Image (tube, rainbow, N blue to C red):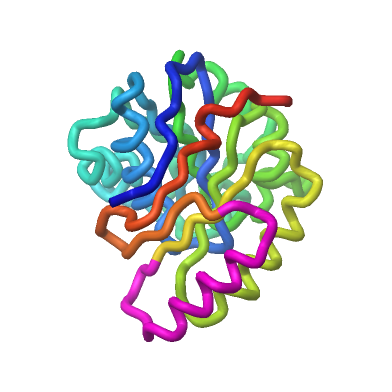
Amino acid sequence: MPIWSAPNQVMSKVALITGNDTGVGKTRVAASLAKLLADFGPVRYLKVVETGIVQPIDSDANQVSNWAQGELESSTVLRSYRQPLAPVFAAASEGQELAFRDLVDEFQKAKGPNWNLAEGAGGMAVPLDSSGVDWKDFAKAIPVDAVVLVVENRLGAINQMRLLDAYCQDLSIPCGFWLNEALPQETEVIRTNEKALSSLARSTWGIQRHGKEPTQVDLSWANEESDV
């Protein structure tokens, strides 16, 4: 059973779901969090940017709605592009310019009065406009109340966790790791990844297999008052 602290009733809080790379399971984690937080009020899912989407049925908003099994108030995509490229280049391929301030403004207008799950595209440091600002800057600009750092639980995860940990050192926002085993891994790989994660100062907020419910969850951050 998941181990977690139940959040109190909240007013317009935002958790940014980002990670070390694309394809690490951010959308699966979003669905899991939607189900966990839904007991305490309506939850909105907002995919800020997605790329590589030709048919609406392939959208992350559609996927997370299915996986969350009716626990979402709504699921919305703010920006969607057809080419499977980094956001700035995917927008450019359609003759558009991605503007960071516009993304922030659109998100502020779309968020709901309770918990909002904001899912990014790609990894945390992918640029969101020509100036090079990224999801860390987005987290500060909103400002969000928590940053969920999804890392694929595989060989190499220790390096990825350490890099993300270092990159987030200047964030005053609560950040925690969520290990997601996208593909079956050797038991020793999983064991050593979890051991390495426990040695970091940053908290472990979740551990799960791809497509399954989390085996470990910590939602104590959902009760914390934001200092930003």
- Residue 26, can we see it? yes
Q: Quadrant of the C terminus?
A: top right
In the foreground, 178 or 217: 217
Residue 89 in the image: above or below residue 220: below
Which of the 4 image quarters holds residue 43? top left
Horizontal and vertical percent position of residue 198? 59, 64
- The residue drawn where x is 62% and y is 45% is 175
In the foreground, 93 or 170: 170
- The residue drawn where x is 75% and y is 37% is 172
Q: Is residue 114 left or right of residue 67?
A: right
Which of the 4 image quarters holds residue 117? top left
- Taking the magenta stretch, the answer to whether it contains residue 26 is no
**Total of numbered circles in the picture?**
0
- The residue drawn where x is 71% and y is 33% is 140
Horizontal and vertical percent position of residue 186? 37, 85
What range of the chain is rendered magenta?
181-203
Horizontal and vertical percent position of residue 139? 66, 36
Q: Is residue 157 left or right of residue 125?
A: left
- The residue drawn where x is 51% and y is 17% is 12
Residue 68 in the image: above or below residue 71: below
Horizontal and vertical percent position of residue 227? 72, 25
- Residue 93, can we see it? no
Residue 31 in the image: above or below residue 15: below
- Taking the magenta stretch, the answer to whether it contains residue 196 is yes
